[in-house]
Image (spheres, rainbow, N blue to C red):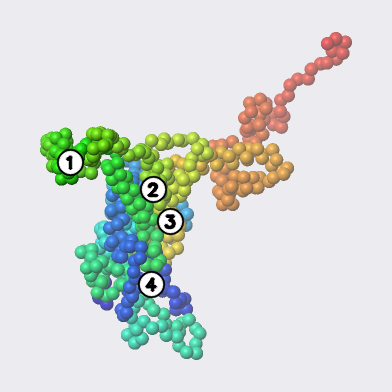
Amino acid sequence: MAKLFGFSIEDEDPKSKGAVSPVPQNNEDGVDHYLTSGFFGSYVDIEGVYKTENDLIKRYREMALHPEVDSAIEDVINEAIVSDSNDSPVEIELSNLKASDSLKKMIRDEFKRILELLDFDKKCHEIYRNWYVDGRVYYHKVVDEKKAEEGIQELRYIDPMKMRYVRQQVKDKKDGLVTRTPAGTSSPEDFKFPEIEEYFIYNKKSNYGGGGYNPANRSASQSAGVRFTRDSIAYCTSGLVDRNKGTVLSYLHKAIKSLNQLRMIEDSLVIYRLSRAPERRIFYIDVGNLPKVKAEQYLRDVMMRYRNKLTYDASTGEIRDDKKFMSMLEDFWLPRREGGRGTEISTLPGGQNLGEITDINYFQSKLYRSLNVPTSRMEGQSGFSLGRSSEILRDELKFSKFVGRLRKRFSNLFNDLLRTQLILKNIVTPQDWEVMSEHIQYDFLYDNHFSELKDAELLTERLNMAATAEPYIGKYYSQNYVRSKILRQTDQEIIEQDELIAREIEAGVIADPNAPIDPETGQPMTPTSGDSIDGESGSVPTEPEMDTSGLDDVEV
């Protein structure tokens, strides 16, 4: 195998030899096919959707140019990536990471550096759209290998049609790819499993072997081009995989059939209206007892005499008379023999129910559903309400969750770039990154108010229930039960809130709820140290006693 281009990050502490498995390591794109040498099979695409990955990407890009599909894509991108003039579209969240403040600061600085290399503030919409439409995105990490400690110098976008990800089985010189099991042993260390090598192939012609890169026939002749190491390419997929063919799909894949059906219905509707809409006349010409040839000549003379076909040339703006042409939309001239009703002119009505577009609306809503976009957004006249959550459609909540999953998947691109940057600059080790990556989150700017309204109303209902249950605390329910079951606070949240409340009471931000209340003012009583209100320690002033001895004889 030829030398791979780029750099590679090696783990200094490999896993134990006893930790072996016959199953290859899982890959993020879910592709389980390998490029090997030897006999290859082929497959027949019965559905006719695609034969190569290039054909698939071309189809996705053509679909994105359709007005309805483009509108749905823009709805998804506008919800996922919110471009604001002041804030960055995405920020790194390290609150769950157990590390020193200095390390967190370095991670934040390197993440800002990555956003600068991507020019994410300006190109966030373009980057996200390329990933969403194509179903994958590639970036080449340009690194000066002589000065690797300086990190990534440049990030260059690669067209997915020019790049392929390959998982290849390393060929053994003695035994080929055959797996040996030594006789008389059951130790996993003695088993020999195939080794998998991962790399990328770049071809600037975006065409493999003339017929495209076939995922079912990955021969060595199709792998011509520059080979990149796995670590030198940032690779992020949509997460959708066709397991039967081992191909990464886009979220537009489900809409292929719906879009084709909508196109055919719209074309057929246009043809029907053009052919059925105009009214046409039928001229019954009385030819008497004329022979057939004479009758036809007479009919033609009458037709040419009364026909006036004026045509409008849209290119030049001229009106000319074309009497020698007769289209399917013109009038009908029919002969009538003697004994009939003579010459007659009648009118054929145009097509009926031309305003019925129920089938168009059906396929449009079906297209939107296949793209996971609420059908309510298809109507441009629909208003936006900021009322109760009962007024919010369930489709909007589903759409909000769908956008959240897309953000999680797209964050793998940031993870890949951040891992490379931190390891190259010797900030963390590969072992440290494996532990830290689980606690690193990415906070996107949020613009979907539906989920926010749902959470606000849910919190309001919980607080109302807690207020209702307050008289029964200590009688039927404990305080911990109300906080955990009604307010839905976790044990960790209860501990954190108690600490914050105690800290704010001590700082004087909020009043102590257990302090005695002054009956006159209604404010908590906070006596000064060692002194009472009247200046004498231990005594509280009271009102003077009234003399009631003379009130016994007084009539009330």
Is residue 121 in view? no
- Residue 487 location, x and y as percent? 59, 44
10 Å crowding of disc 1: few (<14), some (14-19), many (20+) = some
Q: In which quarter of the image is the C terminus?
A: top right
The circle drawn on residue 290 is: 1
First reached walking from the N terminus: tag 1 or tag 2: 1
Element assignment for label 3: loop
**Residue 330: which quarter of the image?**
top left
Relative side of 468 to 76, left or right: right
- Residue 362 location, x and y as percent? 40, 46
Residue that badge 3 annotates? 440
First reached walking from the N terminus: tag 1 or tag 3: 1
| Disc 2 from disc 3: Cα separation | 42 Å
Residue that badge 2 annotates? 363
Residue kind at label 4, given as amino acid type = Glu
| Disc 4 from disc 2: Cα separation | 57 Å
| Disc 4 from disc 1: Cα separation | 107 Å
Residue kind at label 3, given as amino acid type = Ile
Element assignment for label 2: helix
10 Å crowding of disc 2: few (<14), some (14-19), many (20+) = some
| Viewer-closest of 516 and 139 | 139
The circle drawn on residue 12 is: 4
**Residue 156: which quarter of the image?**
bottom left
Residue kind at label 2, given as amino acid type = Phe
Pair 1/2: label in front: 1
Q: In this view, does 416 lie above or below 456?
A: below
